[in-house]
Amino acid sequence: MAQEQTPAGAVPEQSAAAAPAQPIFVLPPKRTLAQNVLFFVTRKPLGTFGAAVAATLVLMAVFAPVIANYNPYSVISQCTSEQNNRCKWASPGARSENPEGIMLFGADHLARDVFSRLIYGARISLYVGIVASLVGCTIGMMVGVISVHFGGATDLTVQRFIDALISFPTLILAIAIMAALGASLLNVIIALSIVYIPSTARIMRSQFMAIKEMDYILASQAIGAGNWRIMIKHMIPNCFALYLVIFTFHLGGAIIAEASLSFLGVGTPIDVPSWGGMLSQASSANVTVAPSLAIFPGLAIAVVVFSWNVLGDAIRDVMDPKLRGST
Amino acid sequence: MKTYIVKRCFLFVPTLIIVTVLVFAILRVVPGDPAVLILGGEEGEDDYSEQQLADLRAKLGTDKPIYEQYIRWVGRMLRGDFGTSYFYEGDQVIDDIKHRLPVTIELGLMSLIMASIVAIPLGVLSAIKQDTVGDYVTRVITIAGIALPNFWVGVMTIFFLVLFFGWAPPLDYKNVWDDPWNNFQQLVFPAIALGTSNMAFIARITRSAMLEVLHEDYIRTARSKGLREGTVISRHALRNALLPVVTLTGYEFGRLISGTVIIEVIFLLPGMGRLLITAITSRDFPVIQAIVVMIAVVVLLLNLVLDLTYAWLNPRIRYS
């Protein structure tokens, strides 16, 4: 926000310097942060809802050790409220002799507390989602700007690589990369980052193509600005709105992709409390034994993805109405 | 049009080559020698001689330099030979795929047809009744349909089927030609689970395409010459709106394929996706390579055909 204040502050100075000449056009005062937020809230109620849910989830992930009453990895031995005192497949609301008390969503096939695993799962999901889409989108954007700025043979070559990468369905490419790297959290992030490069580069490229033709690019070339200065100072900042939109959409996509990989057993290692992994252990054969095991992680994924998508939609509409329908 | 076709096809070849190089390279990043992996078995025992290792390397062709391996691999693929599986001795990968592919295709087509049957009327209704309760309900359903991961929809489908009908995923898959009714019963629920996200996607783009078309002058003309509203919608609006819907759905083919992998695993269907996952857990690289290359090439070809069709139907594309 501080960055945006500077040009607004510069305006009065300019008009003061040119005092003798009547200012033809006076900029309206810059909106404050509070006004901007209010504008967003009143204009985009659904987006605000999405932002609220997304923020809650981020807080939940950050404060997971405070919220979760059990250790997500530890096996609970004695259940007071269950038959045979067994905690395996314990039903929601079961109690154990442990000081931690109630098991809000029951326990899984290894008698671990589902609620605590779910809370810690938010960490895994958001961590993978944010890092993978941040890295993927940033590299994609760099590829896009380089491709457009240098044009010609560079553009043609880069675009063929993008064509090739884009022809792999997202999940198939991620699976293939995971097959090569092996199952681990870091490898999931690497695989998903690679997966989101080509689509980002492709969308950003079309935007950069339009920007390249702008007069201010010509002007900066005329004053002798170098390649990097033009790309980083002039081209990239003007695509920030689109970048943000793509980022939020890929974030939702990355969360689903991570869950899918873990569900298929090629993502995070099996003991890590990932929502997809939890679902896979609950799936098919076991779903009738303890349906809550399958319902809660699935709902968690759906709520997160839904909130980020809705937020992304709203950001897109507010920041740049021209972008409607671009992703 | 001719120059467009030539240009588009000309660009297709390098892309195809890059695709094969990428697949080849991704699976060569793996540390470790496939020959050691096969001889060592699951426990990683070391009771094999140097001679055995050298023989197996010669047999697999991994003793040759990497570029030679690549050229041999591509050359064989062009002749329809996708190599043999590492672990099922003498099992031709192409035979595996021949058995598995029809299942995947049938599942994909079935879900696409069912999704379109529901989604297109839904999208049209949502557009002509814009900003009514029905429109909002449709929009919420479509956003939810996109946000719900399809593996969760799959697991939930099984859960409700078991709960209310005592249904269980069949262990023995029946071919459509041998036992069509049985085959339909086996595929209908997986197809529904797979189709939810497609349904949501198609309904969304049908709605926006219809909204765009409904503001066109020729719709006003059609109305003002006294055509019934139903005729205006079906003959004039929907026909024009369907063009982007059909092409965009075509471009979504990749996502459909990603979905079949998951749905086949959940519903225990013997398709390509399940073959891919089994191959990955056993690190059976010839199988993985064959499937991934095949999918990528099909997507590339489909995109080429769609681009050309679209350019043929919509001349504005050709000149951009």
Image (cartoon, coloured by chain):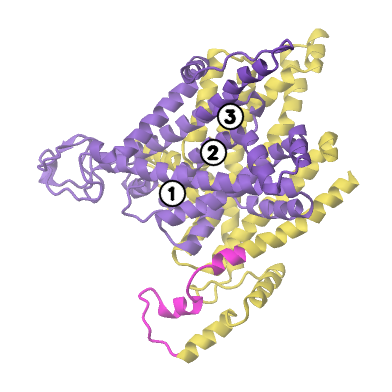
Q: Could you say which disc has been placed on residue B174 in the image?
A: none
Q: Nearer the viewer, mark 3 or mark 2?
A: 2
Picture quadrant where residue A126 is located? top left
Q: Is residue B154 magenta?
A: no
Q: Tell me if label 3 and label 2 are in contact, CB under 8 Å.
A: no
Q: Residues within 10 Å of mark 1 (few under 14, many from 20)?
A: many
Marks 2 and 1, how far apart in space? Answer: 30 Å
The residue where tag 3 is placed is: B118
Disc 2: which chain? A
Q: Are marks 1 and 3 in contact (CB under 8 Å)?
A: no
Q: Amino acid at mark 3?
A: Val
Foreground of the two, A177 or B100: A177
Residue A269 horizontal/vertical position (percent): 36, 56
Q: Nearer the viewer, mark 2 or mark 1?
A: 2
Chain A image colour = purple
In this picture, residue A237 sits left or right of residue A129: right
Q: Disc 3 on helix, strand or loop?
A: helix
Q: Mark 2 — residue? A: A247
Residue B289, image x and y in percent?
Answer: 58, 64
Q: Which residues are magenta?
A: B23-49
